Each structure stands twice: as C-alpha cells, then as structure tokens.
Image (cartoon, grey):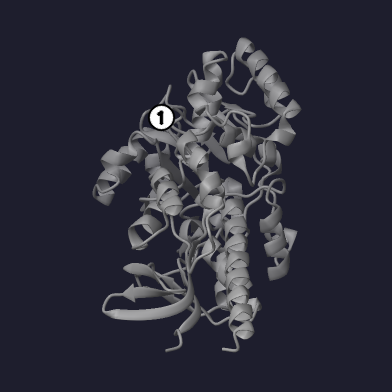
Amino acid sequence: MSPDLDVAVVGAGIAGLTAADELRRAGLDVRVFESAGHVGGRMASARRDGYTIDTGAEQISPRGYRATWELLARLGVTEDEVPRIGRPVAVWRDGRAHSGVTDPRGMISGAGLSARARLDLLRFAAWALRRRADFDDDHPERSPLADATVAELAGHYHPDLHDYLLQPVAGSFFGWDTARSSAAVLTGLLLAVGGAGTWRTYRDGMDTPARLLAAGLDVVTGRRVDEVVADRGTARVRIGSDEITARSVLLCVPAPVARSLHANPLDEEADYLAACTFTTALKVSCLLDAPLSPEGAGRPYLLLTPEAEDRALSAIIFDHEKHPGRAPTAKGLLTLMANAGTVPDLLDAPDHEVVERLTTAARRYLPSLGAVNRANFVHRHHHALPEATPQALHRRARFMARPNGPVDYAGDWVMLRPASEGAVRAGALAASRVLSRLRSTQDTAAAAGV
C-alpha cells in the first residue's frame, strides 16, 4: 500500500517550516503537524490590545545569520522589515546600569567591568580573533575549547569576566548554567554575531518568517504526534488513534521531545539525543501605560541582571526600545526573564505567583513599575534552548555521520547553535538528506524495473 504522504514534518517551528518549504518546492507532498495552536515554536509572537509580544526569540544579527537572510530574501522580506534595534545592552552593577555590553565602546565605558577585567577581556578577545578560523559554526565539536565549559574558560581570567559578562550573557540569551554549557559554542557565537549595536528584530514580530512560510504549506495545528516508528524504508506517525504513513518523517522538535517520540532510533541517534539536554525558560510580559527605562544607561533595550546581583531575574527587555511598534504610542512593554536557577521552582507555579515574584524583583531597577503595569502574561518554555554541553559536542560527529533513514531530525540542537540560524541551517540540511534518500530509492526502484 502506498504511503499517505511523501514527508510528514513534526513541529512547525522555524526548522520544521524551513525543511517543509524546501521539500514542497522540490515537488513533494508534505504535511506539517504542530501540537500548539499556532506556528513559530520558540519564534512565536502574540498580539494583544495593540501590543506585539515576542514569546521566545528576541533578535537576529546581520552577521553570522547567512542562511536566515537567504531565507528572508526568498520570502520577500526586506531589510526595512527587519530594522536595526539601535539601542544598547546594559548590565546592572553597584546600584546602577552600565551600557556597552558586547559593544567595542564598552571597553572605554567599562560596561560594568573593572579595569583589570577589561584587560583580561582584551586578552581573551585577541586570542579568540587570532583563532577565529578554528571556530566552525557547522562543526562546533572541532573548535578550540570543545572540552571546556564557560565557567572553566572564565576561571583563567579575572572573576568579573564571568560574573558581569559571560554569566549574564549566557544566562539571559540562552538560559545556560555556565558550569554545564560549552565555551566553544558561546565563543563561536560571540565571534559570529559581533557587537549588539548591529542587531536587528522583525518589525511585525519574531514570528514573521514562520507565518510567511506556513502560508504556503499544508500545516495542521493543534495535532499532537504521539509516536514515530521507522518501518522498512517508510515511517509511521501515530496521532491518537490515527496512523499516517510517510516515505520520510522529520522530527523538528527539541531533542528531548524527539527522543520521547521516536520509538526505534539508531544507536548513534539515541546517544546524541540523550546528550542534547535543554534549558527551561520563563518570561513575563508587562503591558505598561507608559514607557520605562533604567536611569543613566542611554535607554537600553536590554538590561542584564547578573546572578551576582539578582537571583530572581536574568534580564529585563524593554520591547518598546527594541522596536517602537511593539507597544501603542506613549505606552511601554517589558519582558522579565527569570534567572535559570529560579525557573525550576516557578515553571509550573500559578501565573499570579510567577508575576508577583518577577515584578517584585524588577522594581529594584524600575521603582515606578507598579504604577504603570496594567497587565501581565506568562510564557513558559519547558524546552527553551539546547545547553550545548561538551558531552553533546563529543557525540555530535557520530550523529552527523549516521546513515540516511526514514526518520530524520532538524532543530537548533542538530547544529548545536542555540539560535534561529541554527534552526534554519538544520532545516535545510534535513531537507537535503530527505531528497537524497528519496531520489536514491527511486533510482534503485527504476533500476530494478519496479
């Protein structure tokens, strides 16, 4: 009996939609299944009362996002629709915000670092720039520092470099525990994307590419896949009491989810899936009757709150500074990001408890928050971003060399690049593997006269 589909894609995040679009353009019959009621995954946006709320990812860079910009060009998205943020990143220290984090000008202003720490930062930056060619985005396991965690790297330098730069950057952007996550991956990302002064965001929300891709695809939302089984050159997808067969299935979901869905993975797949642990994340959106900003920091769009200063929050995003269209005129929008150590206690707590804990912490930096905070929304991510541990790096080469089978994968965790660029690259790679396998199967059948 013929399969129901050429390809079933599980997950309508940017990786799954990229793969599905590539395969549809190649002439295959593709259907995408998404358990949520919307597309975008961790690049989703919500719209309420004139506010545009990015529930997951926040920004992209003109550097280090080659595949993403190529995808946007194909979708007809212009640079005007991905404007430069143009506001600084600040860090809190000694009772005030210091601008210039991840920006060369921070070496002059200090950006919260002591003079000795700035010298050590220059020393590290000079070493990293000399070795830049050795940090391969597509093969992070081959990069220098592959055996080291962020904390181990920081141990060679002044403590400020960890406490007021590496930890807050890793903790806020990725939710990482620096004692677990890879120094090679973090260094490679910092080298690739450059200073924060060039970073951009999507004018109409971070879900812009997902919405555009989904418009041309067969996407079924609100359907949770329960199991995927590889079976003699095809695969079966179980959704409740229904079963669908496909020539190929792509699991475009976080690694822990893929591990739970795939009933019979290859050994090299199972080993890598087990090593690809994920962080959790918790965010609270605050809809404000007036814009707020921390004093004396040049109206940053992001304020990092290091663990050395705050155990409840990792950052505050000023969305109305990130892009004025995120909030109605004369209004404000904040995103409060929970510290990684706080998330486990709050992830399944009632919304009111999460809001109270994070807004209370935020008033330290924004004393008038309570007077203008009109509504709050909680966003939970049980699988936020790959931790990219040294253990995962060591297992990646074997995973990437695995045979081409009826069940394959896409996601930022495949590239061990916790960003939309990693997801887009992984989606394109998965599509090419599917096309290669299916064409090979067709050629073999033709040669046999089938």
Q: Is residue 29 above or below residue 268?
A: below
Residue at x 32%, y 45% (from the top left corner)? 355
Residue located 60% across and 30% down the image: 297
* Amino acid at pointer 1: Arg
The picture places residue 108, in percent across and down from the top left corner, at 71, 20
Query: For numbered disc 1, what is the local secondary structure?
Result: loop
For the residue pair 138 and 88, the one nearer the viewer reads as: 138
- Residue 435 in the figure: left or right of residue 312: right
From the viewer's perspective, tell me whether residue 93 is left or right of residue 381.
Answer: right
- For the point 69% across and 49% down, the residue is 84
Give the side of residue 376 with respect to residue 202, left or right.
left
Q: Position of residue 68 (x, y in %)?
A: 66, 57
Picture mark count: 1
The percent position of residue 124, horizontal first and vertical second, equals: 66, 21
| 91 to 193, vertically: above or below | above
Q: Residue under circle 1?
A: 364
On-image quarter of the C terminus: bottom right
Which residue sits at x=57%, y=21%?
Answer: 112
Q: Is residue 449 above or below residue 312?
A: below
Q: Position of residue 98 (x, y in %)?
A: 58, 25
**Would residue 98 be seen by someone viewing this image from the given angle?**
yes
Residue nearer the viewer, 295 or 22: 22
Residue farthest top in this picture: 116
Residue density around tag 1, few if under 14, some if 14–19, many if 20 or more, within 10 Å: few
Comparing 314 with 137, the one in front is 137
What is the quadrant of the N terminus in the image?
Answer: bottom left
Residue 292 shows up from this direction: no
